[in-house]
Amino acid sequence: MSVADNPVVREAIRRLDAFGDAAYGRMLLRCLDDTLARTIRTMPDGTVFVVTGDIPAMWLRDSTTQLMPFLAIMRDDRSLQDLVIAVLRRQFWQIQRDPYANAFNSGPSGRAHDPDDLCDDPWVWERKYEVDSLAFPLLLAHRLWCATGRTDHLAEAVRTARTVIRLWRVEQDHESLSPYRFVRHSGPPSDTLGGAGRGTPVARTGMTWSGFRPSDDACAFGYNVPANLCASAALTAVTRMARSLGDAVLEQEAAALAAELRAATERHGVVTHPEFGQIYAYEVDGLGNALLIDDANMPSLLSLPITAGVPVDDPLYAATRAFVRSPANPTWYRGSAAEGVGSPHTPPDHIWPIAIAVDGLTSDDPAHARRNLRMLLDTDAGTGAMHESFHKDDPGKFTRPWFSWANAMYAELALDTVGLGTRPLWAARAPSSRAHLPDPGRGGSVPVPQC
């Protein structure tokens, strides 16, 4: 399956060619087609399993982000719409099976990242509990509705949302109520939780606890700030889906928890930095400890406009963004090949293409976005693909030769730089004027459904 004949993709390539290098458009097509050709597995039940790349498991977060750029090109493509709905149904089934798991097998094979983990479910590849694993499929369900008007997946989405809300409520009081434990005896300390698998102590704050970050590394402090803001945005999406189905009870429950998470995060997750003033911390514990860092994996602090509905011009975000893009952030690297955010998950001095794309998408300067797109093109080490990370001075030193999420983020940025991306689905805006998706056939736009 290829999107070469998709009218939005054709128009995007035409506009990218105007930048003076046909490589921009070739990379866009290659990244989109690679997802369709190499990561998609149709299952006997009609759902779709999505491998993350060079690991044969399906991550709830990764499978969402791998499909996000397709939302911009599927308005008139029923087959792409059906594909995303089939992936959503697989995600919903996985969440219902084990909402604490972050990655799954395609069948009950018993394959696992580490067979000694405290999990004996043969369907589960890894049971690292991450708040964002539950938030991202709900965001995808809502954005698909907004992009296409399709509603045949909403009933399953809101049914899954009830499971998610129950768990996030439990994890608001992790110390007293949570049954979750994670112990891994092999690997680095970041691969397991202390406190006999409970994690480091936390106070009850109103935020919801997470054992692991979106990088799959253990949280230093149990309340991950970008994940809580992302969860709040996902719950806001649930309120709209529930309202459309006439489920007033769920609408109220989702709205209440969304407000609690956002208020608690603003109360406990904001710190005063001596150089940048009030900024979001990356993690806190409610006991006075805060981690000032960012991680390339989304949701990140840098990605809050994309993943949490935070406006790019919000003063708190702007200050946080300035911190993230400075030497004060331990994961910000600038070298002879590129600059951008890395992760404790990968070696020092390694920049993530995902973060370069996010930095471009969340900039209000089109020239900055184009510069970042060029940076991505120039740091693929001649492989024709985005990698997990690469050395700031030598793109030939990279991690993971095939990482589909990074390919998707190149596509997101490429489409956005020519005005054909998913921005109308996530950019915070006043309800009016800008609720449109591109219509390359007419050179104008078509209304997004009121979702």
Image (cartoon, rainbow, N blue to C red):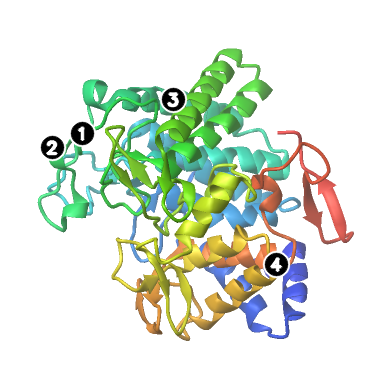
Label 3 sits on residue: 165
Residue 124's spot in the image, x, y percent? 28, 44
Q: Residue 306: in sight, yes or no?
A: no
- First in sequence, mark 2 or 1: give its number: 2
Label 4 sits on residue: 366
- First in sequence, mark 3 or 2: give its number: 3
- Callout 2 secondary element: helix
Give the position of the N terminus as an image quadrant.
bottom right
- Callout 1 secondary element: loop
Residue 285's spot in the image, x, y percent? 29, 36
Q: Quadrant of residue 14?
A: bottom right
- Callout 3 secondary element: helix
Residue at 43% x, 80% y is 335
The Cα atoms of the two marked residues, 4 and 2, are separated by: 47 Å
Mark linked to residue 201? 1
- Callout 4 secondary element: helix
Residue at 61% x, 23% y is 242
The Cα atoms of the two marked residues, 4 and 3, are separated by: 38 Å
Mark linked to residue 145? none
The Cα atoms of the two marked residues, 1 and 4, are separated by: 44 Å
Label 2 sits on residue: 195
Left or right: 333, with 84 as reference point: left
Q: Are marks 2 and 1 in contact (CB under 8 Å)?
A: yes
The kind of residue tagged 3 is Ile
The Cα atoms of the two marked residues, 3 and 2, are separated by: 25 Å
The kind of residue tagged 2 is Gly
Q: Quadrant of residue 342?
A: bottom left
